Image: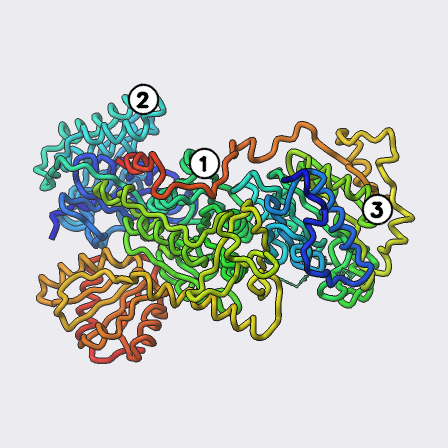
Amino acid sequence: MPDDLNWAIGGEAGDGIDSTGKIFAQALSRAGRHVFTSKDFASRIRGGYTAYKIRSSVDRVESVVDRLDILVALTERTIDENLDELHDDSVIIYDGERTEMENVEIPGDMVGLSVPLKRLAEEAGGAIMQNIVALGAACEVTNFPIANLDSALEKKFGDKGESIVENNKQAARKGQEYVAEEYDYEFRYDLDTTDDDYVLLNGDEAIGMGAIAAGCRFYAGYPITPATDVMEYLTGRIEQFGGEVVQAEDELSAINMALGAARAGARAMTATSGPGIDLMTETFGLVATSETPLVICDVMRSGPSTGMPTKQEQGDLNMTLYGGHGEIPRFVVAPTNISECFHKTVEAFNLAEKYQTPVFLLADLSLAVTEQTFEPETFDMDAVEIDRGKIVDEDEVESWTDERDRFQPHFSTADGISPRALPGTDGAAHMSTGLEHNALGRRTEDTEIRVEQVDKRNRKVETAEEQEDWDVREFGDSDSDNLVISWGSNEGAMREALDFLEEDGVDVRFLSVPYIFPRPDLSDEIEAADEVIVVECNETGQFANLLERDALTRLKRVNKYNGVRFKADELADEIKASLQTEEVQA
Amino acid sequence: MSSEVRFTDFKSDKQPTWCPGCGDFGTMNGMMKALAETGNDPDNTFVVAGIGCSGKIGTYMHSYALHGVHGRALPVGTGVKLANPDLEVMVAGGDGDGYSIGVGHFIHAVRRNVDMTYVVMDNRIYGLTKGQASPTSREDFETSTTPEGPKQPPVNPLALALSAGGSFIAQSFSTDAQRHTEIVQQAIEHDGFGFVNVFSPCVTFNDVDTYDYFRDSIVDLGDDEDHDPTDREAAKTKILDADKEYQGVLYQNEESVPYSDLHGLDSNMADIPDGAPEGAMDLVREFY
Ligand SMILES: Cc1ncc(C[n+]2csc(CCOP(=O)(O)OP(=O)(O)O)c2C)c(N)n1
Ligand code: SF4
């Protein structure tokens, strides 16, 4: 087990919880420690409890756990909200001079450190820095070199000017000194540092960075939690590479703008979440029948309808797999962790152009809002390969024209993939349409051509199934009779759950599946195991249903749909309990 | 190449299936002539067509084209133009497509002022679905779905465009070939979003807004020496006058700066390197 520290800051939404938490995460990362963050938050801008949690260790951390060691509580409610995770050795930092915190009761044997955050911040130059005072106090409690916090403050406030940076450093020191002088506890926390350099980013940022790396130059979107970070990341960056972000009037427009850019030959993408993907459904079929390469990213959140906008769920698998009337050839790729958000985005663009299909990049809230540390080489730009598929130039046009010299954008080839001429290519002017069409892209209701075109489009999927690697990611004990399968962000919690299970003498083989469609055939693995459990964050077991159909069998399920992601220790318990039950509940 | 282009080069070899006499013939001819007149050729032209009788134009013209989803032609055109500024982008559709299901996009396309042309073939009826009321149908126009008329005022597309900050607002009549062509040509030449509402009569389902009606009522601003299209106030007065059917450029903002210029977009986004772009590693370093 990693020797980890679990730290949190909580308060009212609007208290700057997020940015303060991020600064501390940055400081830990600067100190060569691994970091995995999570957020508890309400979607209101002000009012409502919110917290930023950090799990940190010198070893890699892949998940959150049910334990909180140090809590900066800006409100009393913050303590109540976290009672389950706090323990006797926990330290709670709060401002006892605030009227509403005067009578705070520190539960059990926990240590309560009252630090006058506001007063010390004012001394350092302004009450606005009270959270930074708390970070300084946290440095003292954890014996953590404050120079790392300085460096994070420089990064955060550097462009606001030297004096702001200095004031913040000053505020941090006041918090640190106050704890050192006023309290003489022997705190049991001692944060080691290393010389390693890490980068710290979340899944949305990884998707955005992957898009730019893959040559995406056009992004259209409409803001929605938790996909907005993709758009905000790209804004200001994609322009440096000759691209553009357009904030559309709605998602109907966003997907059609991206489609237009893709028809013009740009690598284009849009990203949204549940309510927005509903609107975009209208255009899925057009993308597919006009054979336009497009990456459509759905960062899932709790549904249905407006659901729980800031909560985790993997409920849109069926929607991306089946959404839209008629039958639509498409690919659905679901990154299993934050670095994979980068790699799968690059892959999605290649798949889209090679096969001229819509590719759904199905991420989830837990990936989007988690910041995690990685070795920078994880994002190796030199390894990025671009495959644009069958784009034909002026000289090649002739080989794809009919007897009347007309270019055939939907020519039925053996592998199903037709030539693609970008607008501006001489001699290849052509149309396409959402109506069923012939090889020229013109409307037809001819029964034979209809069948030919449907088959042709589906043949692309068959070709892709043969030509691409639809790998699974394997962890744990490959000889075990206990098989756990999951998709999306559950990978991290499950990887750590393997350690808990091993401690308890339970061996498990774990397959993490990043491809929903096409997907690897796991029938053999399922057959070889005695017990098979599918883990996912939804109620109906959308992925389990697919696997049951693939393998013609019944599988056990561990589902969570209360809006909170799986935690490693909790998941280990669930797996154990599931292994002990006889029945497969269908 | 462009000097040799004739307007018939923009004609596809597909014979239109519009009803004989449909206004869309004239609208399309004018568009093709205007494209040729402005030095375009089919290989650098992208037509985005809506859904409706009018939307069939994508098939009858020869150019790069997409015939998309009902009401979403403008967003598609926006994406095409921003991705490749070298293309001449022309969006065309019906009044239902543009002012009903797509009206949200219309307003925002006007505001965005992307350098493209939008031609609405306004027949004040739903043609393709065989004669239901459209947003520009008259209040008392009886149709299969509005037996006593819609009982609501028609939208005024020119007013919508003006209030949304439109930089080029015009109207033409499909059968007045010369004027219609001139006006579309001006829309193409305009630096920004060139919007032309074209009276394009439906001879099958609209017996009120007919050729005769328009011929009798059209006031051509080309004949009005006092008309100054850069005068927004004057344009407003004309546009809000419900009793008149104007032909001509009602308003043009000569200072219009198209989206691409404001946002510094001048390259073809289709041109990308074989691997990650130069400088991509800086993106990773930012996360230290
Ligand atoms: C989402 C959707 N709803 C309804 C339709 C059916 N439909 C096709 S065209 C049309 C309206 C056509 O009217 P207009 O845009 O004025 O074009 P016109 O046929 O008169 O040229 C409708 C309602 C559709 N294709 N898609
Ligand atoms: S129904 Fe009306 S709009 Fe449609 S083709 Fe016939 S005349 Fe034209």
- Asked whether the residues under marks 1 and 3 belong to the same chain, the reply is no
Q: Earlier in the sequence, mark 1 or mark 2?
A: 2
The residue under label 3 is: B176
Q: The disc labelled 3 sits on which kind of residue?
A: Asp
Q: The disc labelled 1 sits on which kind of residue?
A: Gly
| Dot label at residue A125 | 2
B52 vs B221, left or right, is left
Q: Position of residue A33 (x, y in %)?
A: 17, 40
Tell which tag, 1 or 2, sits nearer the viewer: 1
Q: The disc labelled 2 sits on which kind of residue?
A: Gly
Kindly identify the residue that appears in the image at 48 percent across and 51 percent down: A396
Q: Is mark 1 within 8 Å of ligand 1?
A: no
- Residue positioned most to the right: B216
Q: Pointer 3 indicates a residue of which chain?
A: B
Q: CA distance from mark 3 to mark 2?
A: 73 Å
| Dot label at residue A242 | 1
Q: Pointer 1 indicates a residue of which chain?
A: A
Q: Can residue A99 be seen in the rendering of this structure?
A: no
Q: Pointer 2 indicates a residue of which chain?
A: A
A573 vs B142, left or right, is left
Q: Image quadrant of residue A241?
A: top left
- Asked whether the residues under marks 3 and 2 belong to the same chain, the reply is no
Q: Residues within 10 Å of mark 1 (few under 14, many from 20)?
A: many
- Asked whether the residues under marks 1 and 2 belong to the same chain, the reply is yes
Q: Can residue A32 be seen in the rendering of this structure?
A: yes
Q: Residues within 10 Å of mark 2 (few under 14, many from 20)?
A: some
Q: Nearer the viewer, residue A374 or A265?
A: A265
Q: Residues within 10 Å of mark 3 (few under 14, many from 20)?
A: some
Q: Secondary structure at mark 3?
A: loop
Q: Position of residue A278 (x, y in %)?
A: 50, 59
Q: Is mark 2 within 8 Å of ligand 1?
A: no
Q: Secondary structure at mark 2?
A: loop
